Image (tube, grey):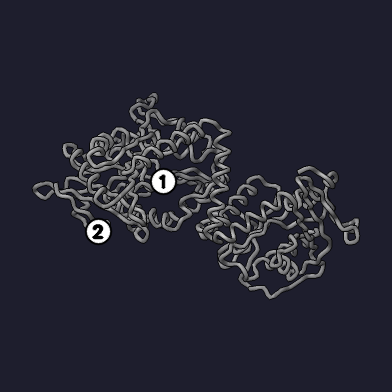
Amino acid sequence: MRIVLLKEIPEDAELGRQWNCLALRTERPQVFYTYEWALAVYRAYGATLHPLLFLAYDEVGALCGVAALSTDADEKCASFLCSTTGDYCDFLSAPEKKDEFVAAIVGELKELGIKRTAFANLPADSGTLAAIRRAAPHHSSFCFARTAYVCAQVSLDRLEQGKDGKLVAPGLKRLRRLVKAMGPQAPVQVEHRRTWDSVEPVLAEFIQAHVARFLEIGRISNLAEARRQIFLAELAKVLSERQWFVLTRMTAGERAIAWHYGFQFQGSWFWYQPTFDSSVEKHWPGFCLLSHVIQDACDDPSMTVLDLGLGSEAYKAKFANESCETLYVTLHRSILEHWATIVRYRVASAVKSSARMEKFSGEIRKKLQGIRRRLRDSGAWSTAIWAGKRAARLVRERVEVVFFEGDDCEHVSARPQNLQLVPLTLGHLALAATAHNADDLTLEYLLRCAKRLRAGGAEGYVLAEVGRAVHFAWTAPMDGFFCSELNTALRASSDSVILFDCWTPPVIRKQGYYEHAIELISSRIRSRGKRPWVFSVVGNVASTRGIERAGFQRRYSLMRQRVLGRERIIGDPLTLPKAMPQMAAGSEDSAA
């Protein structure tokens, strides 16, 4: 067996043909094993990817093995090339050459100086794990395997039959309820798009819906990342040429309400990335779309299984009648690192067994991530100063908040004509998440906005410039508003409205968006016969200047003072007229 190492995925039709022949000879052929999948990954991530493509040829020069791997930037750790995109990954070889091929690859990795290899999403029923275990001792390596996922599947021939003898998908009753709820004015239809020409016009619509849905459930979709979007487009192009791709879209009238980006390959319909419009969530559109897909699969004689893929979402259990296990396999050169991996896994399993421990560890992990981000952005010295100030505030802290009222006179600043203030929607947040995907602070803010938008009780606004969001702001009744800076609720007249939680993404700051936004919001509040208010912490010079340039006038200030855990709110009686908002009763001297 002759091994050839390539550090790219070449655009080679003959290689692709032989590669796919090997993919079809695996225990369970998957679309993730194909040449087209690896090519789409390389096209999308080639700028940051470091492929290690091992090709094995037999005595007559025929391709008999493929291992598509990649390394980190230091070329010390290796993994499957498609591990972050494919639900299943494996070594491809003729069954009779599996042991020889795997042993050869383990040896090649050792020669390259790879210290750690992680084989994620390896099917448990594959012969690769046994081959790795047999090869590892001969190359001074240590193997550890653990369960990664249990993938739900729907075996079509195990579904119930209807009165006419045909297989019937579960969940069709709920689908009929959705059709009835949408009414005759918005008939529900499902279409399957399989060509790139038909997919391209609606792919961006699917991506935005996916990002918006994830924001609403408190997560950032991987589709917010530009390279992931490129990957989906490249994958749709190459797979549609082989008739392995399908984008399913459910519409109610002219409006799309659910989508599914999936594949049809060797008798399997793969449920890869679904999403739906949250505004019709009460009708379960995603559930209904899956029911429809299963029924269409039942009606297709070439389909035998609908694979629901990675993840343990509750809805999958309502459909699944069998499953497939995947493994996470590590290969270490160092026995110490090998045992450290095992210990970490055992500890993590113990933590997950307790909901309280898992929540606590999640909070600790989030704090550590924040510290690492601060170290990365500000450096060790600035981080140390910040930590010292935080520690000092635990003992003694004084925070003064200044309140400003919008002027009764119409204030007109030199505002660009292309700025427009509009009510905030989930769509705005989705577009902003995509535009600022590398900005962790903005992503945190967008998640907070999505949660507030879902809860209601406050109005969100976005300042848009040529279709992009450049500033976000919120308003709420001032009476009863909880001011976190003061750690107390405010009391005010019923006609007072407070502006709060304003945000301009860091990369587009210092262009006056804040003052333009609050000026427009102030004008809108006054047009409703209300009094606009905004506040700023003393010391935030940029905020204060923006507020004053927007025509707001300083009225009064309140101070929160904390000493050894006890708090009190201090107001200046000389500048706090009775007509002005005050802190809520009972907050004068409250324990922290």
Q: Residue sitting at 49 percent across and 49 percent down?
A: 221
Q: Position of residue 522 (x, y in %)?
A: 74, 63
Please provide percent x and percent y for residue 147: 38, 34
Q: Marks 1 and 2, how far apart in space?
A: 29 Å
Residue at the spot x=65%, y=55% of the render?
Answer: 388
Figure quadrant of residue 548? bottom right
Judged left or right of residue 391, residue 117 is left
* Residue designated by label 2: 11
Which dot, 1 or 2, sits closer to the camera? 2
Above/below status of 583 relative to 549: above
Residue type at mark 2 is Glu
Q: Residue at x 59, y 62 (%)?
A: 505
Q: Quadrant of the C terminus?
A: top right
Callout 1 secondary element: strand
Name the spot of residue 512 as percent of width and height, x first.
65, 70
Q: How many marks?
A: 2
List the single residue furthest toward the top: 163
Give neighbour class at mark 2: few <14, some 14-19, many 20+ (Cα, 10 Å).
few
Identify which residue, 319 or 50, lies in the foreground.
50
> Would residue 229 be seen by someone viewing this image from the given angle?
yes
Q: Which residue is mark 1?
A: 248
Seen at 56% across and 54% down, the residue is 443
The reply to whether dot 1 and dot 2 touch (C-beta < 8 Å) is: no
